[in-house]
Amino acid sequence: MNKGILYATGGYVLWGLLPLYWKALHIVPALETLAHRMVWCLLVVLLLLGYQRHWQWLPRVLRDRRVLLTFTASALLLTLNWFVYIVAVNANHVVEASLGYFINPLVNVLLGVLFLKERLRLSQSIAIAVAISGVLVLTVSYGAVPWLALTLAGTFGLYGLLRKTATLNSLEGLTMETLILFVPALAFLLYQEFIGVGTFGHTGLTTTLLLAAAGAVTAMPLLLFAAGARRITMTSLGILQYIAPTLQLLLGILVYREPFGGARVIGFCLIWLALGVYTLDGVLRGGRAASLQPATGKP
């Protein structure tokens, strides 16, 4: 099998299994988990850059105000996306979180139309209309608008839009984002320790090790994805990206026993039908639709 497919599949599988990891940290407040993820992720990417001796890009970027502003914005979007995802998982909304990443490709299309002046093809218009119908059905099913899913899809879509126009690759970009987030995240953790409510080192060895490993858990699927993306087509990436939300959905239904029946099944089926139309259009066009490419921040 093509190594690129193996790498990309590995990355998506790890992203799809992330609910298991955040569930294991359910005793830690979501904001504290998020802060640990930021701090440890920076340490991991710095180690990787040190191993590669790949520092020459950093001084140039730090002097470029436009790049700094772009990555500050993407870092804030990434923060909100990560936080909402952790909250969703630990509030037993894994199924709804998976919905956010199912509809994300269609959100990317809308953002392309709004901000990049791209034109909708007929098949894309049909896919978006069907997806909106699915969201409306789910709104009735939940008794409220599925804000968690829409927030995840929206923040990740906007994040992808910013990264699409950025000049740095995935590892460099993640380094800049976590570098920007490091100081406030570390300050928050130190404050938690100062007032005596921090969990790191105080709630058992397992929890402490899981918090410390959050950086590696964030970086590993990203590196696998980046390695795969260099070796396979955009169309293949566009199809493989559904592995992650599918695994999340299965975890929500089969492992965490979240409700999934009746109108929710109908709503998800409409979303899947929309994705089928959209993906088939991309396949038939030989992967020329760049919006099929997932962003690189992932939950």
Image (cartoon, rainbow, N blue to C red):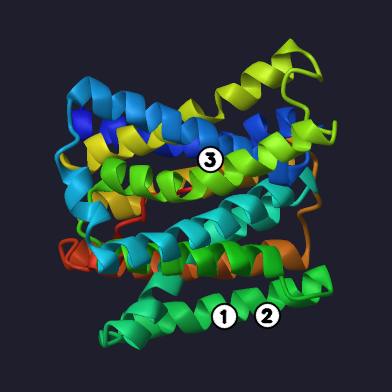
Residue positioned 36% across, 55% down in the render: 295
Q: Is residue 102 left or right of residue 210?
A: left
Quarter of the picture holding the N terminus:
top left
Element class at badge 3: helix
Q: Residue at x 47, y 26 (%)?
A: 216
Q: Is residue 35 left or right of residue 226?
A: right
Mark positioned earlier in the residue sequence (2 or 3): 3
Rounded to the nearest whole Å, what is the CA distance between mark 3 and mark 1? Answer: 34 Å
Asked if marks 2 and 3 touch (Cβ < 8 Å), the reply is no
Camera-side residue of 44 and 83 = 44
- Name which residue type carries label 2: Leu
Q: In percent of the image, x 80 and y 68: which residue is there?
A: 142
Q: Closer to the observer: label 2 or label 3?
A: 3
Amino acid type at circle 1 is: Ile
Which residue, given by chain and number where applicable, does mark 2 sit on? 136
Find residue 38 and name its label.
3
- Give above or below for 149 relative to 243: below
Q: Are marks 1 and 2 in contact (CB under 8 Å)?
A: yes
State whether residue 259 appears in this view.
yes
Where 124 falls versus 27 (above or below)?
Answer: below
- Residue 218 position, x and y percent, is 47, 35
Q: Is residue 34 visible?
A: no
Q: Residue at x 50, y 43 (%)?
A: 182
Residue holding disc 1? 132
Q: Quadrant of residue 50?
A: top left
Residue 201 in percent (x, y) is at 74, 18
As rendered, which of 209 and 4 lies closer to the eye? 209
Q: Are marks 3 and 1 in contact (CB under 8 Å)?
A: no
User: Spatial distance from mark 1 to mark 2, Cα to Cα?
Assistant: 6 Å
How far across and how far down the image is residue 86, in percent?
A: 67, 46
